[in-house]
Image: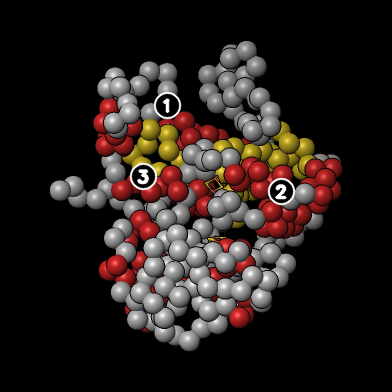
């Protein structure tokens, strides 16, 4: 009998749903064994019944539930609770669901400040009222899914990788344990050359590193030692494809931290300050350190800043 799959999306961009399609041909084998019972991006399932006759939002029962996106409204909270109630196994799909992701950068501001900025204070906005009718109330901040309901597994990344989604779905279909996330850092899997000393101060973000196109990555100097801010030291490994090389480094780009911190207790700010100092770079050159070092992990870590 096919496994029943439900998927919901909250505060997202949709990239993690595209990653499911990016699984490519192996997805065809997975789909033969799966019955999708709820997936707003694919099918119009009415939460309050086909004719709106229901009084509570309902999702069909499923063996596996995937949630992408962090929780930003009271409606998301209720849907997360309904997904938890109806799904035997619940998985956070992507960094927005796992740690708030990019939307959680907004946690540096109160909800009122955000509403004022978007609907009243921005230079291109006509100063009208703040909408408050027939829309779900916002929560006080962006929450990761596991801050609201218990989650069984995490597939981080912005977006997460097709290999991880396929690996998790195949494991579940075969009744095997879900793959465990690595506990090492992106630097631990990075093949670039390191000499433990920066050759330059931190560069502007858009400057390109020195590399020889087509040459093995092991011949390129570590990007941070080249003066390019790279969050590899404070980011969980696991984004590499079949060659194991981190996804961005393979494209000669620095790690932006999308796999999140190496553990719940890790403090990316402290880890990055230590990594920068250890090669002679001054972390104080980075003006917005809390947001920069928690770019994808603001749900439990960023709070409104004192205003001057
Ligand atoms: S984790 Fe990234 S790709 Fe996935 S929904 Fe969030 S912003 Fe989009
Ligand atoms: S700082 Fe970046 S470039 Fe340097 S080793 Fe770590 S991941 Fe690789
Ligand atoms: S290198 Fe860093 S930013 Fe790039 S995919 Fe891997 S974890 Fe994400």
Of 256 and 227, nearer the camera is 227
In the foreground, 59 or 283: 283
The residue singled out by tag 2 in the image is: 22
In three-dimensional space, the C-alpha distance between marks 2 and 1, rounded to whole angstroms, equals 32 Å
> Circle 1 — which element?
loop
Q: In the rendering, at what x and y percent does residue 201 appear?
A: 35, 74
Relative to 42, residue 224 above or below: below
* Residue beneath disc 3: 106
Left or right, 276 with respect to 145, comes to left
| Residue 131 or residue 181, whichever sits in front | 131
Whichever of labels 2 and 1 marks the residue nearer the N terminus, that label is 2
Q: Earlier in the sequence, mark 3 or mark 1?
A: 3
Residue 125 quadrant: top left
Residue pictured at 29% horizontal, 32% vertical: 122
Q: Could you classify mark 1 by the number of other residues whose Cα lies within 10 Å: few (under 14), some (14-19), or many (20 or more)?
A: few
Please tell me in which quadrant of the rendered image residue 74 appears.
top left
Position in image of residue 192 (x %, y %): 57, 78
What distance separates the C-alpha of mark 3 from that of mark 1?
18 Å
Ranked by sequence position, the earlier of labels 3 and 2 is 2
* Residue 238 appears in view: no
Estimate the spatial distance between the alpha carbons at disc 3 and disc 2, rounded to whole Å: 29 Å
Query: How many labels were placed on the picture?
Result: 3
Residue 66 as seen in the image, left or right of residue 207:
right
Q: Which residue is mark 1?
A: 136
Q: Residues within 10 Å of mark 2 (few under 14, many from 20)?
A: some
> What residue is at 31 percent from the left and 48 percent from the top?
108
User: Which numbered disc covers residue 13?
Assistant: none
Residue 161 place in picture, x, y as percent: 65, 55
Q: Which residue extends farthest left? A: 308
Q: Dot 3 lies on which element?
A: helix
Residue at image position (31%, 58%) is 288
Pair 2/1: label in front: 2
């Amino acid at each position: 009998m096919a496994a029943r799959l439900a998927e919901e999306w909250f505060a997202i961009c949709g990239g993690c749903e595209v990653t499911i399609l990016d699984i490519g041909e192996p997805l065809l084998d997975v789909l033969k064994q799966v019955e999708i019972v709820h997936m707003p991006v694919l099918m119009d399932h009415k939460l309050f019944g086909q004719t709106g006759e229901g009084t509570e939002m309902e999702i069909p029962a499923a063996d596996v539930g995937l949630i992408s996106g962090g929780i930003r409204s009271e409606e998301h909270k209720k849907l997360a609770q309904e997904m938890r109630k109806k799904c035997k196994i619940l998985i956070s799909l992507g960094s927005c669901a796992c740690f708030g992701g990019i939307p959680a950068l907004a946690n540096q501001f109160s909800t009122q400040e955000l509403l004022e900025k978007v609907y009243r204070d921005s230079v291109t906005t006509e100063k009208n009222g703040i909408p408050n009718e027939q829309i779900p109330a916002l929560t006080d901040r962006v929450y990761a899914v596991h801050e609201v309901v218990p989650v069984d597994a995490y597939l981080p990344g912005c977006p997460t990788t097709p290999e991880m989604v396929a690996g998790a779905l195949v494991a579940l279909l075969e009744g095997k344990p879900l793959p465990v996330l690595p506990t090492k850092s992106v630097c631990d899997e990075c093949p670039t050359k390191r000499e433990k000393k920066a050759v330059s101060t931190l560069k502007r973000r858009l400057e390109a590193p020195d590399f020889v196109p087509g040459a093995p990555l092991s011949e390129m100097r570590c990007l941070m030692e080249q003066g390019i801010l790279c969050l590899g030291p404070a980011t969980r490994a696991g984004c590499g494809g079949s060659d194991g090389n981190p996804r961005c480094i393979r494209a000669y780009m620095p790690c932006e931290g999308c796999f999140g911190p190496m553990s719940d207790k890790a403090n990316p700010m402290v880890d990055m300050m230590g990594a920068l100092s250890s090669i002679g770079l001054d972390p104080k050159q980075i003006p917005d350190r809390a947001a920069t070092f928690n770019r994808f992990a603001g749900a439990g870590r960023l709070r409104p800043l004192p205003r001057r």
